[in-house]
Amino acid sequence: MMKEKFVAIIGGGLSGLCCARKLHAEGCSWKIFEADSAVGGRVKTDELDGFLLDRGFQVLLDNYVECREQLNYADMDLRAFEPGALVRYQGRFHEFSDPLRKPSSIFRTLFAPMGSWRDKIKLSRLRRLTDPRQESSRTQFAGLTTREFLIKYGFSKRLIESFFQPFFGGVFLESDLRTSAGKFRFLFHQFGTGNATIPNLGMGEIPRQLVKPLPPENICLGVKVESVSRQGVHLANGDDVDADAVVVATDQTTAVRLLGEPEVDQPHGVWCVYFAAPRDERRPILVLNGEGTGPINSLCWLSAAADGYAPEGQDLASVTVLQDAGDSGEMVESCLTQLQDWYGDEVTQWRHLRTYHVPNALPKQGSTFETGSRNIQHSSGIFRCGDYMEYASLNGAMVSGRECAEEVLRQLG
Ligand SMILES: Cc1cc2nc3c(=O)[nH]c(=O)nc-3n(C[C@H](O)[C@H](O)[C@H](O)COP(=O)(O)OP(=O)(O)OC[C@H]3O[C@@H](n4cnc5c(N)ncnc54)[C@H](O)[C@@H]3O)c2cc1C
């Protein structure tokens, strides 16, 4: 019965792929129309001279519930970073970790100068407050931005600026911390209880694994959808494809255009600058700029966590810049100046590999954003999914895609 129904999915990012997987598993006919030449959307990995370059620094938190359901972690050969961070502050690097996760870091963390003792006690209490089982604490985050929550909770300006700002600025891709405190609550818990990981062969392994069980002939690459209606989709090449249901699985900016809704705020963008360096003893831990000066928000030695990212004898550093850089050549130069200040003369041996600018990296999700606030069904026969429906993340995109397919199946039932 379901085989007679046909669903047109626009977009082959993680949400579109997870929507297709569910429809496929239930025996429904479907096709993905993807404008790009490959699936994966915002999750792609390029190869350059034996280095694996993700299009923007991303990590998979291994306790994301939906990711665990959809992915086979063992096959992906996930490699974990050390919990916590090394924070550059007052001209030195200081370790800042959760002593419950990494007991050996307790003294270094307690004596790190970025926050007071009071801050550190509050930090350990925050762990309990962000636990999703503490349903009653949810109201403490409601209607606030992350910055407003951190101030209200009593953290010092010093800790907010030297730790929360670069850490969560790098997660939200905005350093003002205007993102909803609800999203902060969700992610603080995820970071506190799981590992930040990357697949040894790059983040592109995620869509590669998701697409594996799907018939390739159902995935139309290089096919852009121009408009949608309850009858089906109109392609940029002029063709029309009839469908019983249409799923818009694009980024939010494209989705509102296709669905004829009011424009949304410009998404957050980010720059990612890759450097090659001679192989050395380097720690697989996030390095944060806690000083607030210079272009760099954070740095990560990807090859220290996952040796597949760099060829023999070399290391790969990924540098994240949140400010709008304008000229990318000048930005690379100013990153190198700052890196020289951090790491000294060894930086003269580093080689700039490539710079990625991702202008459409994450949707803005401010203080009023709540998950589940948008209807999956837009109108008769037209449905939507994408990271912007949930707290935008790999996990959110996957949840949204699967839930959308469930709704489509119910309606077509
Ligand atoms: C730099 C960066 C860092 C990130 N860091 C993390 C992180 O550390 N952890 C985390 O969990 N998440 C992170 N994310 C977020 C995560 O990658 C995204 O939330 C998720 O990949 C979005 O998936 P999606 O399917 O909703 O959208 P997309 O990936 O945007 O997929 C939409 C697809 O639709 C296609 N499309 C658009 N218009 C059309 C059209 N007209 N016709 C046909 N096809 C169309 C696009 O080509 C694209 O393939 C990061 C994202 C970026 C960019």
Image: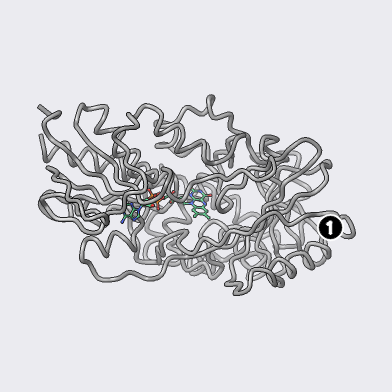
Q: Nearer the viewer, residue 132 or 183?
A: 183
Picture coordinates of residue 86, whole percent (x, y): 73, 53
Q: Quadrant of residue 212?
A: top left
Residue drawn at (21%, 58%) of the image: 227
- Residue at numbered disc 1: 347
Q: Which of 75 and 180 is in front in this view?
A: 75
Secondary structure under badge 1?
A: helix
Mark 1 residue's CB less than 8 Å from ligand 1: no
Question: From what the image shows, is residue 286 above or below residue 406?
Answer: below
Image quadrant where one finds the N terminus: top left
Residue drawn at (28%, 52%) of the image: 372
Picture coordinates of residue 265, whole percent (x, y): 37, 71
Q: Quadrant of residue 340?
A: bottom right
Image quadrant where one finds the C terminus: top left
Instruction: Residue type at mark 1: give it.
Output: Val
Report the side of 4 relative to 356 (left or right).
left
Name the residue furthest bottom.
326
